[in-house]
Amino acid sequence: MRIGVPRETKTLEGRVALVPAAAGDLVKHGHELWLEKDAGVKSGFGDDDYVAVGVNIAPDAAALYEKGELIVKVKEPIAGDLPHLRKDHLLFCYLHLAAEPTLTKQLLGIGLTGIAFETVELPNGDLPLLAPMSVIAGKIGVQVGIHLLHQPMGGKGKLLGGLPSTERGKVVVFGAGRAGGTAAGLAAAAGANVTVFEMRQDRMDEMMRLGNNVTALYPYHDVVAREVASADLVLGAVLVTGARAPHVLTREMLQGMEDGSAVVDIAIDQGGCFETSRPTTWKEPTYVEEGVTHFCVTNMPGAVPQTSSQAICAAILPWVSKLASGGDWRDSQALARGINVEGGKLVHPALKGMAL
């Protein structure tokens, strides 16, 4: 099969879907690989690295999409990508359509088959292609949050971990999955007092094992409001597979926080789990609501493209191989669950009721 890897066009997005080593493996299995010129440069991989393993270089996006049958990219297609997509394309990337009705309508109009990384689901409910980026986003969320608390950034001037003679900072995390659990672990390791809200008992148990400075609680409304009011940093990582994220932090709760506090919405790709969240970019990553700095960048892992590209490629390569092998990929229950749109119709159950 002819596999096309375009250059990512989202603002300050540096990832590439397939690193040279993975592309070389696919070539060895008889597939024809095409890469858009300079698609891997921001991740540390030049065109020569790809040519050395048998990859063809397309001079521009138009040529890349013309050659490709299976289009493998990282982020959802945007304005520069959409004119090149065709009905016969098989598109494999992050889509996050629940938060993108306009894009959904455009993909339906094209009529292609779109499989979203974030909805490829194993029988046990695990999301193997979302997991690596969730871990990276969880780490970045805490790193960014620590920085936003610095006074020159408009923060309250608090060192999150504290030190002898000072109080520790307080972090509240919503969700204890891959992103939230990673964020909680890093915040705890930094010395903060951490409260994690989670509904699953097994995950609460896991959070409690992170250390004596971590508390896991069920998200009762009044308890959430109390804990948020005393937090320096709040991170949201609540996920409903394929669906828009629920709001777990209201404006009223936000109003109870001290000025100079910060919130990071890791769920912003799925619409955000804070009432006051709106998508931002790495070019203009923050804004202030109710005296609290909001960080809601929709491609957080794109800030570390070398690490992110290596991680996502290792996760998706077996599935790319399956898709490229022929029509039998539909026998894979996980890939079948990942289909979001096909032939002008919404396929994923979480999307079927969305207003377009």
Image (cartoon, helix red, strand yellow):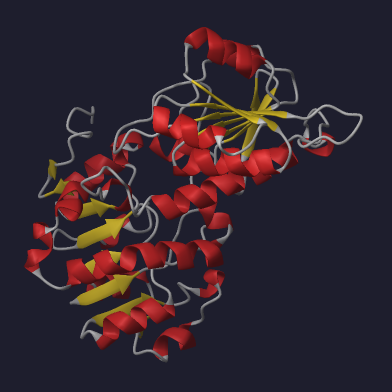
Seen at 10% across and 50% down, the residue is 343
Query: Above or below — where is 303 with respect to 293?
Result: below
Percent x, y for residue 309?
A: 47, 65
Give the residue drawn at x 26%, y 50%.
120
Query: Up-down: is 105 above or below 41?
Result: above
- For the N terminus, the quadrant is bottom left
Viewer-closest of 296 and 240: 240
The quarter of the image holding the C terminus is top left
Q: Is residue 175 visible?
A: no
Q: Nearer the viewer, residue 131 or 215?
A: 215
Q: Picture coordinates of residue 13 (x, y %)?
A: 51, 58
In the rendered view, tell whether residue 184 sits above or below residue 139: above
**Quarter assignment of residue 20:** bottom left
- On screen, residue 2 versus residue 155, left or right, reads left
| Whether residue 172 is situated above or below residue 107 in the rendered picture | above
From this viewpoint, which residue is outermost toward the top?
A: 222
Residue 102 falls in which quadrant of the image? top left
